[in-house]
Image (tube, coloured by chain):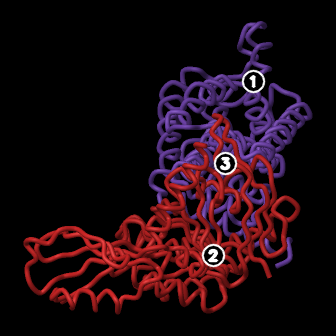
Amino acid sequence: MIALSIRNLQKTYANGVVALRGIDLDVQQGDFFALLGANGAGKSTAIGIICSLVNKSSGSVQVFGHDLDRDPVAVKQCIGLVPQEFNFNQFEPLEEIVVNQAGYYGVERGEAFRRAEICLRQLDLWDKRREMARSLSGGMKRRLMIARALAHQPKLLILDEPTAGVDVEIRHAMWGLLREINQQGTTIILTTHYLEEAERMCRHIGIINQGEIIERSSLSQLLNKLNTQCYELNLGKDLPHFSDQSVDGFVLSRLNDLTLQVEVPKEQSINNLFALLSKRGIEVVGMRSAQNRLEQLYMDIVANSRKGAAK
Amino acid sequence: MKRPSLNRIAFQTIYIKEVLRFMRIWLQTVVPPGVTTALYFVIFGNLIGERIGEMDGYSYIEFIVPGLILMSVITSSYSNVVSSFYFSKFGHHVEELLVSPVSNWVILTGYICGGVTRGVVVGILVTLVSLLFADVSIHSYGLTLAVFVLTSVLFSLAGFINAIYANSFDDISIVPTFVLTPLTYLGGVFYSIQLLPEFWQTLSLVNPVLYMVNAFRYGILGVSDINLGVAFTIILLFIVVLAGFSLSLLRRGVGIKS
């Protein structure tokens, strides 16, 4: 079943800014989908329309078969939103925020308190339940937004940059939690600027640029499009007189005395690279990817799209 | 989830949230009207009122009791809704309601009932304060209660519309300062319009607050400058128009959606 189906979605704001130029997008039930794009590309507008925060100019949105125009109540009941900005009442206790959210979706008050306990415990906020939201740290506020979005047990969870400004430890904990939620059957749509996050978590990727979807495929298909992969090698001995060179398709560049950067073409194997280096007496003690693979692809796709638009 | 059940629970949630909001800060929301009214009674009732003598057959302090109670109800209902809804816009937590399946009329009813509840709580407090200064007996309980609630509903709706259009905290204080207060003070709270020259009497009739104050005064004292039928027609007409307009604003997302 299709969790989200968007057809020819367009949005022009009152000031004349065209945010969406007729996008089509399908997200399957159970998917973990990443919607990527630069600032102002149209991600938040698209999410705003799906969640009824922004009025669309034209086009259609269906969520689990319910049409947003014909049955907005059914659509809204399916969705849980974690927006980019903190949008809860900072002067309300945490428990009240989650209970109220459940109430807006028709969850009886007793059951709402039970669910609030589950969600707050899951997000490690139960001990803070009586505190005002304004007293929480940034990471806790992000977690509160997730707890709130889960209160009515949505089938589709939409997260707009949920880990922005969150420290590494909390980010990893949130990744774990989102994976768990997805494994339990909730479809997740994520927008993020951290492409590493999208590569780690998502099965399908959509890239939006200047109000148009310019790429939409599975992560594995997308990564297959990479023609080269770039690595940084830490060397055991200095290479003071090494000059940049291309050998058997490998492009080797010296970054400093103890670091080499190597571009490995898609058809070449890493074993061949090590054999080559070994033959030249270069000892490698460590290796890491010089650039996130998805980041590399993202940059290529967006650049190609811009070139296409310029033509 | 069936719609009636969803609407009932959502209404209950908004209502409880609204009541908890103003009760949490009762020192700012409930107590001040009691203090202000006590000062009015001391100054206008006791000190100046004794020199004024009777008005419409009642001592001046008894005459101003209904108007002062209703003035507190008007101000409290209006300010409760305008500040709560504007603050939810300002803090973006109105989005919690917009993304949820709550119907617009449920949102409106929840906020209005919150405003009416604060009006009732403040009204009861002010009435208790007035009993310390004047011997008040109620002429018609039903009529008094009806005007009390309907006025509260009307000004809660006005506060809601103000909040929708407001873009800054200044915008939510402009209407109370430059419209609501003059209308209330010139709405016969402190005087009978029969004391005014004919031109000002006629002009006073365009002030809707005059009808509410007089209908409320009739409920408590049994005297009024205005025909009760006309007063109720005007109050109900305003409620219908403002409610319809509020729902239209919500449906179009004015001030709350891009």
- Badge 1 crowding class, 10 Å Cα cut-off, few under 14, some 14 to 19, many 20 or more, is some
State whether residue B94 is above or below residue A259.
above
- Badge 2 crowding class, 10 Å Cα cut-off, few under 14, some 14 to 19, many 20 or more, is many
Badge 1 and badge 3 both on one subunit: yes
The label number, if any, that marks residue B207 in the structure image: 1
The label number, if any, that marks residue B18 in the structure image: none
Alpha-carbon distance for marks 1 and 3?
34 Å
Residue under the image location 36 percent in, 88 percent down = A270
Q: Name the kind of residue labelled 3 in the image.
A: Lys
Question: Mark 1 or mark 2: which is in front?
Answer: 2
Q: Is residue A170 visible?
A: yes
Q: What element carries label 1?
A: loop
Residue identified by numbered label 3: B257
Q: x%, y% of residue A6? A: 76, 63
Alpha-carbon distance for marks 3 and 2?
21 Å
The label number, if any, that marks residue A157 in the structure image: 2
